[in-house]
Image (cartoon, rainbow, N blue to C red):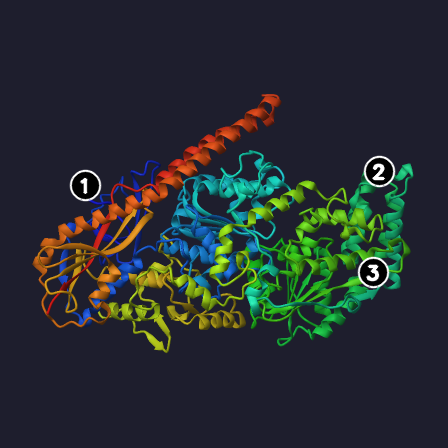
Amino acid sequence: MPNILPLAPGMRVLCRDAEWLVQRINASNDAGTQHAVQVVGIDELVRGYQAIFLTQLDQIESVDPRKTRLIADNSNGFRRSKLFLEAQLRQMPAAGEEADLEGLGAFDPMPFQIIAVKRSLEQLRPRLLLADAVGLGKTIQVGMILTELIRRGRANRILVLTKKSMLTQFQAELWNRFSIPLVRLDSQGIAKLRLQIPTNKNPFEVYHRVIISIDTLKDVGRYRHFLEDTRWDVVVIDEAHNVAGASIPENHQAHKLARLLSRRTDSMLLTTATPHNGKRETFGRLISLLDPSAIPDPRYREYDADDIRGFYLMRFKEDVRHQAGLQLTERFVVPLQETTAEATSAEETAYRILGELRQVIQSQKEEYSEWRNQRLIQYGLYKQFLSSPESCASTVSKRLKKLQAENPQSPEIPYLKGLETALRKLALTDSSRFQLLLKQLQEIGWNGQERCPRVLIFTEYIETQKALTAAIAQAFNLKHSDKFEDQPHQAIASISGAFPDVHLMAAVEAFGTKSSPVRMMIATDVASEGINLHHQCHHVIHYDLPWSIITLIQRNGRVDRIGQTETSILRYLMVETKNGLLKGDSAIFERLIGKVEEINRSTRSGESLLQLYDPQKEEEYIAQQGLLKADSTVLDKRVGQSATTSTEANDLELIISAGNLKDDDDLVALLLGGEEAGGRGSDVSSEKVDSVVANNNSRIRFYKDFDFLVAAYRLLQESNQEYLPLEIEGRMLTLTAPPDLKRRLGAPSQKNEIIFGGTAIPQEAWQEGDQFRLTDDVERVKLAITAARNTSGYWSKELLCSETHPIMQWLVERLLMQFARGEAPIITSRELEEGELAFCFIGQVPSIAGTPLVVDSHSIRIRPGGRCEMAPLQNTLAAAGFERLANTQTPARVTAAELLIPAAVEASLEHLRSLEKQRQEKVKPLLQQEEQRLQQWSQKRREIIDQHLAEIDPNSASAKRLQRERDEMDKYLKDRQQHWRDMHLLPGESPITRLVLVIEGVK
């Protein structure tokens, strides 16, 4: 057995003539023989500074626990020892598969969310696709899972990818509710970082918890060398359908990025409400990102429910409505007769030309045959005119110029000229649709002033958006600017995909802030995906109608979602034409709206209705099979009755539905008091959920979080003049950050500091005077989050003092520095047998990568006469009356205790070896099962590839792609063994133990 034991978090070490506290250890080579040691400074000159040392370059000296020196604690009630032990216990990673909801975050957990956490924790390597319907709080579930992984020491390095419009929203949600800090690398953040670090420095090594947009990072060529040199604990990809590689995955930059990251992370979480497009391969690719060895077919076209089971969860609103209670309100659709207007006579002229155009190009005359497949002429111009004359006129003008230059004899030209003439006489401000909108705004009580309700208006076209914004501003005598930076500061904000990320996020945040001047948001469909717009708004107006069920569900989901406190009120503006050539269109549009509402009340996805899984394809289908054929029943076709519906899509839905069920969901439902799988049929309160999970809570705590914060800070304050007094009012305290905390958290004033690690908090989270308001009252924090939305935006001014909060972690580390390197306190107890010595240890068995495999707190109790026994630490502390100990100033026998330390350490290590053996015995069959599965997968995959190769030209592009797939499979198997099994599942050189306290029995 080596004399110098491996390093572990919580140990104090010497390096570069300074003393440091170990925070984290990661393997830095494939063999696991070299490590990167993340530390925080202890000595005066380096106190609070974070650094990373490499074992191959730096001499890092640890302390042999056998040589621990004991220091008698003379503090009142052994206060120093109690807080020191508490800090050691809080530094100790959690163990077990059960979620611990106590202090998890500022939200009300629901059973279906707990199942997501449970599903993640039961996996050897947490990898899960959250495919719940729009509005069911997937971000909350991500926060829950990340918190549990952080508690287990498995989520220090986190990378979150999301759409540019959601960066701030996602970042604020994780900070406000879970105290998980993410550094936002938007366009401004990257520019600032580049000024601070050398060009060749890996930006992902500077900050360990990062949120960045998919669009920014998907340039794999630019970032690839940095990403290939970076390993993550967890990668989260929001709106993951964007990385599925729907067309040609080899050319899909976002998919290539996701594949790269999948190989460079231990855990992976994907979220999307639209996990596939009806094709087996798109859903199969998402599953393959989680585990490339799930599906044998390299094209991901052939798999069954057993192949994909356990990798995803898919729930719908009606599945969880009884669990959500008041958090998921009903919605109301204003009757169409109230939101429908008749076309004006000038508009009827344009409708007549559009109707004639539709009729003539559907004729069988040979001279018009070339028009039949031209979507723009068949229905595109008609759809744009339904939106606004300006949108239609812009396209007509462009097309006329193009045709007159390319084909002056085109039969389209006379019709387009006639339509252009008709459109010159029209404007949005005079249109029946706009007048209808004004009437609806009057009914809502909207006038653009401070106290009027907020309204969200959707339109499909930029030209309509511009004209509509100007028309509303003029109608209500409101000032308006089109500049990106002005949108958050005026009554009407408009956003589109053309917005830079910073300005887009600012406009969205302003719309969700009660005190901001924004009372209306006019958005294209850039706002229909992912963004939360429900905090201050419950009115949605569809100014024009997208011919897509998917798009309408996404749009409505921005306000109709968990957390909405009002009844969502939806309005669909419709214009009736008397033109007989367009007869039947209105019936189709009405049925489209009706289908959206039917889907909302069902336990199925909107995408599955037409089985087209793509908004553009739905538009084409409704236009070609409905409008052009005057078939008002087009949306009532059952699967198999139409050529557009796919047997493949139907089979895929059945496979996904079958794979979504799992036997243990019934067990969870039973535990939570339900009757059906997944908690369906149960009416469970969060209090009952808490009690169920708390029964499996094995953590030892002597202080509640709030009380620990107060006691720890006050102890530190006694020896630090820079620590200003806490301001405490009930269960709320205000802490003014001292210099070392400001440095650690990356305060804006620390402009020249480079912060390594995951401690830098969002810049917007800093309050005036560097003050933090912390409480353990969850309800108060929830109210503070609401108050922030009412006054300042996303960022709450009051936060939960949970264990994962960076300030709590800073306190823990500062307390661990209360005793010098190689020292532990010794105290006395009159409740232990006189002469007994209880040596208290916290030990762990780390993996080669440094992650904890076994974590255990225990004591070695040596009785008078030399009798020795091992006992759980909690039992020993209870026997000693630890919580109520008083310091009677009876001197401890320090020298005698120190003589027994080597024997106690050996007993502790022997106990840890026993636990390591037990774990190996438990894991061994799981690993054997996994090895067998991998062998079967690789064999089957190789057979499929060889079969395909035998059927095609060996020199073809397809053959080369298949050969690459075979090579990739071999690389994956090797990488999986090295970077997963060997590095994360197999134990390192030897167990590690730390003597943290000695208790002597006295009279």
Above or below, 276 relative to 737: above
Q: Is residue 356 visible?
A: yes
Query: Residue 642: which quarter of the image?
Result: top right
Q: Say which amino acid is labelled 3.
A: Leu
Question: What residue is pinned by disc 1?
Answer: 2
Q: Distance from label 3 to label 2 (Cα)?
A: 30 Å
Q: Which circle, 3 or 2, is nearer the viewer? A: 2
| Location of residue 724 in the rendering, given as x and y in whole percent from the top left corner | 29, 72
- Secondary structure beneath disc 3? loop
| Quadrant including the C terminus | bottom left
Residue at 76% in and 63% down: 573
Distance CA(mark 1)–CA(mark 3)? 88 Å
Figure quadrant of residue 425? bottom right
Please name the amino acid that badge 1 sits on. Pro
Q: Which mark, by number, is residue 426?
A: 3
User: Please, what secondary structure does the residue beneath circle 2 have?
Assistant: helix
Residue at the (80%, 61%) spot, across then down:
427
Badge 3: residue crowd in 10 Å (few <14, some 14–19, many ≥20): some
User: Local crowd at mark 1 within 10 Å, few (<14), some, or many (≥20)?
Assistant: few
* Residue sitting nearer the eye, 573 or 484: 573
Q: Earlier in the sequence, mark 2 or mark 1?
A: 1
How far from the left and from the top, in percent, is residue 226?
Answer: 43, 42
Q: Earlier in the sequence, mark 1 or mark 3?
A: 1
* In the rendered image, the vertical position of residue 29 relative to residue 120, given as above or below: above
